[in-house]
Image (cartoon, helix red, strand yellow):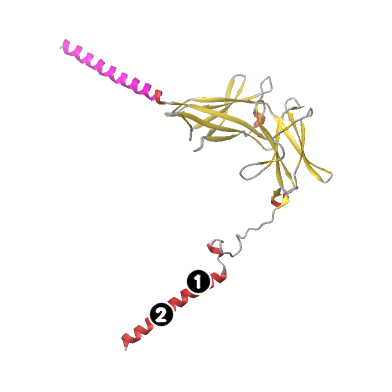
Amino acid sequence: MKDFKLTYRSLLMFVLSMVFGLLLMNESHAQQKKVRARINAEYVKVTGKEHYLDIKASARVERQTVPVEKIDLIIAKVEEDEETEIGTAKTDSQGKARFVIQDFNSLRPDSTGFYNLIVIFEGNDAFKKASRDVSFRDATIVAELIERDSLNFIGARITDTALDSAVVETDLTVQVERLFRPWKIGEDFYSTDDEGYIEVQIPEGIPGVDGILNLEVVLKESDDYGTVKTVLKAPVGELIVDESTYDQRTMWSPRGKTPVVLLVITYSFIFVVWGIFLYLFINLFRIVKS
């Protein structure tokens, strides 16, 4: 009986060891299959409107970079080495997400004037955890419309908000807002002077709805300030004449806008054909009845 108990215990220990070993192997195998995710985040400020982070998640799978879609991200502020969550975001089918900073005034810069945020992905069954630090200073661009000698100019000044000083020798881009892609005015960029100021002539003949142009002055992907832009609505565009025939009855209009003449001809043919059928049917009925 004693030998049976020893054998039973030994067998039980062996089975438990095998099960535990298999669980560890499966967990280790699953961890080996996980791919490291990469998080990129860019700070964007639209002066007078909003602050947000443009986030993109990707991974290297079979030597190809693919978007990491539908993952949950945590955005936190870092102040005095402490992380405090300020919101969440979720990537779309292209691995992109936009997180709008609802209360920018609640953020506090560090001793060097930089705001510090962190984007955190805690990992899932397919991807390992990842994070991205985002640091930036606060800058402001103010633009104005200037008319001189019957010519129109846009003047813009960029300043460091914390220092209340001009940001000099910085490249700004001037462009017109368009539906798909902005249209640049003049050169690719203009460098600010000692007062953080640029002035660019607005060409004539640029079409705009009701003659209004949405002029953008942009600081793109600065190491210190991120992307900063301002939008100025200026009535200096060429009035667009609406030549659309959508509400008119033309051959290329939607079905509900078919030309009346075409409708009359079509229905006339239908009535004539059905009239002939009706006439033949009545005569056939008379013949059968007689």
Q: Residues within 10 Å of mark 2 (few under 14, many from 20)?
A: few
User: Image quarter for residue 2?
Assistant: top left
Judged from the image, the secondary structure of the residue bearing numbered disc 2 is: helix
In the image, residue 288 above or below residue 169: below
Q: Is residue 290 above or below residue 258?
A: below
Q: Amino acid at mark 2?
A: Leu
Q: Position of residue 220 (x, y in %)?
A: 66, 32
- Amino acid type of the residue that numbered disc 1 sits on in the rendered structure: Thr
Q: Residue at x 37, y 84 (%)?
A: 283
Q: Which mark is residue 208?
A: none
Residue placed furthest toward the left: 1
Instruction: Please give left or right for residue 162 compared with residue 25 in the image.
Output: right
**What is the residue that sits farthest to the top in this orientation?**
2
Q: Choose between 182 and 78: the one closer to the eye.
A: 182
Residue closer to the observer: 243 or 96: 243
Q: Is residue 22 above or below residue 54?
A: above
Identify the residue at image location x=67%, y=38%. Answer: 49
- Neighbor class of circle 1 (other Cα within 10 Å; few <14, some 14-19, many 20+) is few
Q: Residue 25, percent across and down?
A: 34, 21
Determine the secondary structure under disc 1: helix
Q: Which residue is mark 1?
A: 266
Percent x, y of residue 167: 74, 27
Stretch of the chain drawn in magenta: 2-31
Q: Position of residue 20 (x, y in %)?
A: 31, 19
As for residue 152 lying within the magenta part, the answer is no
Label 2 sits on residue: 278
Q: Quadrant of residue 127?
A: top left
Residue displayed at 22% across by 16% down? 11
Q: Nearer the viewer, residue 158 or 176?
A: 176
In this view, the residue farthest toward the bottom is 290
Name which residue lies at 44% across and 79% down.
Answer: 275
In terms of sequence position, does the residue under pointer 1 or pointer 2 come before the other?
1
